Amino acid sequence: MKRRDFLKAAGAASLAGLRSFDARAGAAGSAGRRQPNVVFILADDLGYADLGCYGQKKIRTPNIDGLAAEGMRFSQHYSGNPVCAPSRCTLMTGYHTGHAQVRDNKQVGGDEGWKLGSTVGGQWPLAENTFTVAHLFKRAGYVTGAFGKWGLGRVGTTGDPQKQGFDHFFGYICQRQAHTYYPNHLWRDGEIFRIEENKDGAERVYSHDLIAEEALKFIRTNKDRPFFLYVPFTIPHVALQVPEDSLTEYKDLWPDPAYDGKKGYVPHPYPRACYAAMITRMDKAVGRILALLQESGLEENTLVIFSSDNGPTFAGGSDPAFFESAGPLRGLKQSVYEGGIRVPFIARWPGRIKSDSASDHICAFWDFLPTCAELLGVQPPAGIDGISMLATLLGRPAQQKKHEYLYWELGGQQAVRMGDWKALRLKPNQKVQLFNLRTDLGEKDDVADQHPDIVARMKEIFTAGRTESDVFPLPKPKAAGT
């Protein structure tokens, strides 16, 4: 089945599955019971072990660690993809990257999207008929807001966040522009938000701080109605940039002997200190969001989730080996090994999610939309790949449905997790690798030759578990002798 045919069929099935949505949502509202708020905070390129609650020793993250202490920490949660845009697509739509519209970072319209007033550039947009998790909440009467990095279509395209279910957006539309924390503009509700250059030696405006303030403003403005708040922060994605007050918190990491003026993004003169300081600054913003929820009397009626869009980067002077950002996992961003796709995932809902709890439930970004659907008491769109994980969150593991498998693809890479088994193929004509993650978390011992039956099943999924995409084709194996 071609991608266009699959999307047409999926769209029709989604509409059928949601036919009774508005009636159910209206009935819930008329009963006088306020639905819970949902806040999803997403870090950018944060490694599995970059948080204290996941074993980090050098970077201080007290607020996120506190979130884990008050909620549930997942040890086997996966992002949608090893890179930004497709990972966010799976989060928004409930499809894994074998079925998703966006399967790689794809720049369209030129590279000028970062310029003030530019009408070109940006990433491959979500299609007009897409049903997102933001649409799900809007149909239930929620106000929806996104603050941070979008990367799924520029303003004016079908992928514009305000055409994809969000009432409000503030931040970076084009993810290439998000390679600096000191841009000359951001976007607010479809309009350019110009950032004036500071003069007289004043410190420049740090975009992360502006984004955090807008997220807080959204909570204050909408505290008396149910809301869905999506906060895709850009930290700690390169470039390595942070205000001086945060940098000085990590003077113990100065000077950095690893600094060698690498090519690519211009590294910070104290890259290790800067990387750590960026994460701690983000942690403080998370703390402010949590504090405001408490001050506003919303804490007990708000599900807060924190995660990362993929594994840690290797670029721009960052030093994932020094911080052990991927922990015991193999691989980094852009890789379908565990280090590129296994991410921290923390959920807190006082009185509903048991505090200081942990789960080894195997789940992924595409489970978020159906989880929210069950939370709202409605059916999710038909045909999506996600499975609600609400039973796990609410402490009912015996009722939790499980995936037969999880699937990822990026360029020529494919990976499948099925139970404890993980298979991957880095190129279409390469030998399939097989690992038992229960005994080999670091994916060091390829046991494919000892388990031909499992490898055969994984190969079937590599083919049957996806649909072809005209925009993001999977390279074909080369014929022998070519």
Image (spheres, helix red, strand yellow):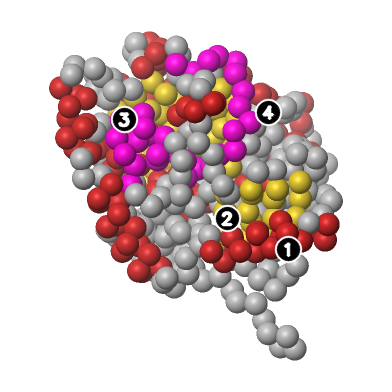
Q: Is residue 284 visible?
A: no
Q: Are marks 2 and 4 in contact (CB under 8 Å)?
A: no
State how many labels appear. Answer: 4
Q: Are marks 1 and 2 in contact (CB under 8 Å)?
A: no
What residue is pinned by disc 4? 54
* SS state under label 2: strand
Residue range (magenta): 352-381
- Which residue: 36% across, 39% down? 146
Asked if residue 371 lies in the magenta stretch, the reply is: yes
Q: Earlier in the sequence, mark 4 or mark 1?
A: 4
Amino acid type, residue under disc 2 in the picture:
Trp
Tell me the quarter of the image containing the C terminus.
bottom right
Residue closest to the eye, 20 or 257: 20
Q: Residues within 10 Å of mark 3 (few under 14, many from 20)?
A: some
Amino acid type, residue under disc 1 in the picture:
Val
Relative to 84, say whether 32 is above or below.
Answer: above
Q: Earlier in the sequence, mark 3 or mark 4?
A: 4
User: Spatial distance from mark 4 to mark 1, Cα to Cα?
Assistant: 30 Å
What residue is pinned by disc 3? 376
User: Spatial distance from mark 3 to mark 4, Cα to Cα?
Assistant: 30 Å
Q: Is residue 138 visible?
A: yes
What residue is pinned by disc 1? 432
Asked if residue 411 lies in the magenta stretch, the reply is: no
Q: Earlier in the sequence, mark 1 or mark 3?
A: 3
- Which residue: 66% across, 24% down? 53
